[in-house]
Image: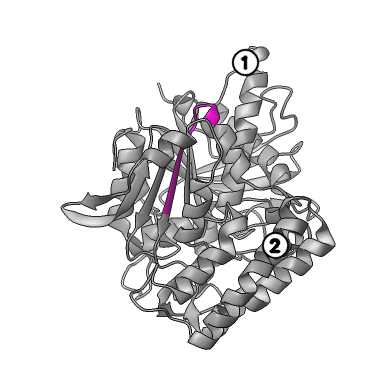
Amino acid sequence: MNSVPKSTLQPQALHFQFPNHRIRIKKTVFCDPTVNVYTGYLDVDAGAKHLFFYFFESRGDPARDDVMMWINGGPGCSSSTGLLMELGPCSIDMNSTSSNGTLWNPYSWNQAANIFFLDQPVGVGFSYADYGETIQTTEEAAKNVHAFITIFFETFTQFSGRPLHLSGESYGGRYLPVFASEIYDQNIIARQEGRTELNLQSVIIGNGNTGISTLYRGRYEIECGTAALEMPVQSISKCVRMKTALPRCQQRMRHSCLDQFDLIDCRAAINFCDSEISAGMWASGRNVYDISKMCVGDSLCYDETTAIEEYLDMPKTRELLGVETTNNFTSCSPDVGADFGIHMDKYNTPTQFHVAGLLDRGVRILIYAGTYDWQCNWISNKMWVDALEWSGSDEYNRMQWRDWAVRGRVAGEVKATPLLTFATVRGAGHMVPHDKPEESLAMIKKWLRHQSL
């Protein structure tokens, strides 16, 4: 018999790893009335940090389907963007045609998996800390996420032991490999101590910020070449300036950020690269997440993000979700982002090393990228994946690129081995499920079934 959490559970200890935690979960009708839906908080760090999540059982076969976690990037952005704008069971209603503020999404990824959307790190979305603490590094956040997932499976016992997939986009390219590495390493300790392991199977990264050493070269190709559109979008004069500055940018970033991390020198290097390589695109008015469009709305360039914030801040929505904090909802927390910026988190440890380590230990990795994204572009991702040093690199480099299709239409190009797959999605920007929902769902279904694209 499946265990269904009660609306509110009092403090309890699962085992010595997570003392004083509490579990406050509400079964709700939010978003998808066709499946069991739960929202609420699981507490970590001796109960002082409260991580909010949305959990949707699969529309397919919840008793057998895998479990997936989705996180957005930032650093410090709520997973509600993915939920209500990309791959979730419902989408924000931009035209006020519905009675509840959302519209049914037939291409939700819970067509294929039981999926939870996590507001992390603490301080993002509806997640909060008792004393306003924030997370300083991805490695620190990884410990919280491992604790959360462990408590999650201890709470939803009917899913215990299911294959687990960590998915996300953007700064998720930094988060996810570190989170997965923490889970893998903790599994070794659990095995030695005779405790239950998490069944980590794969990591799925969309338009990720992972291989930062290639980021600026990729941006130049997207902006000044034909890697995204048929004609370059940037002026010749700006492209010449970018081209001449690129070697110095690369050299300074490698010396100060990658070969040996120095906070002050690395910050100076990144400031130079941003000024000489990235400033032109930011000043152009184009959507940096989809260069085929102009930026609208707030700094994230989509009207939907503002609408999502307003919807989640409505008293009736917060009541439906069981939100406890009185803080206003923000899609991306400026406090968390500032802390990450101060510590230059994405530059002090090259995350592709974590990817290589996971691959060498048999964890499957899917890297996918929309071709219209400039921010975390497909060229940059291709460069670091091609250069990745791992035991299967020779096999991967021997493989040929080929088209992959959905219902007879070419969706993009793919290169794959049994462990590592890189797929482009033509005509999609940074948020692939938003731009190409049918194609993204088809991709995920095949990935979960171990089928080739």
Q: How many marks?
A: 2
Residue 9 picture location, percent across and down: 61, 35
Question: In the image, residue 452 lies at what x, y percent?
Answer: 29, 38
Kind of residue at disc 2: Gln
Point 77% across, 62% down: residue: 266
Q: Position of residue 317 (x, y in %)?
A: 50, 61
Q: Nearer the viewer, residue 231 or 35?
A: 231
Q: Residues within 10 Å of mark 1 (few under 14, many from 20)?
A: few
Asked if the stretch drawn in magenta spans residue 26, the answer is: no
Q: Is residue 289 shown to the viewer in this render?
A: no
Position of residue 250 in the picture relative to residue 331 (left or right): right
Magenta stretch in the rendered image: 360-368
The amino acid marked with disc number 1 is Arg
What residue is disc 2 on?
251
Which residue bears the numbered disc 1? 191
Q: What's the residue at 63%, 12% (across, down)?
A: 194
